[in-house]
Amino acid sequence: MNADHMPGMTGARATIDSSTDETVYMVDVDMGDMTMTNHKWVTESEIQHAK
């Protein structure tokens, strides 16, 4: 895996479970005392359901 947004991610092994043709957004997650940048992948349909 080529990711460095969290400790221990660089060089980790990963498996792709599924894919989509939808637009996918990377979002930041703020948990009060910790902010994770580009952490969560959200699809266009998930955003539409949240409205």
Image (tube, rainbow, N blue to C red):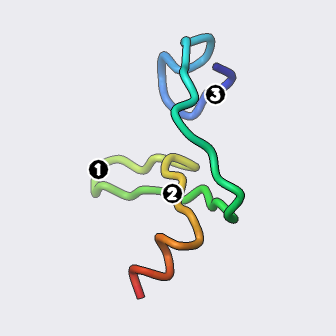
Q: Residue at x 63, y 27 (%)?
A: 3
Q: Residue at x 49, y 30 (%)?
A: 6
Q: Position of residue 48 (x, y in %)?
A: 49, 82
Residue hosting label 3 = 3
Q: Earlier in the sequence, mark 3 or mark 1?
A: 3
Left or right: 11, with 40 as reference point: right
- In this view, the residue in front, 38 or 33, is 38
Q: Which label sits in the foreground, 3 or 1?
A: 3
- In this view, the residue in front, 48 or 36, is 48
- In this view, the residue in front, 50 or 22, is 22
Q: Secondary structure at mark 3?
A: loop
Q: Position of residue 21 (x, y in %)?
A: 71, 57
Q: Earlier in the sequence, mark 3 or mark 2?
A: 3
Q: Residue at x 64, y 19 (%)?
A: 1
Residue hosting label 1 = 33
Residue hosting label 2 = 28
Q: Secondary structure at mark 1?
A: loop
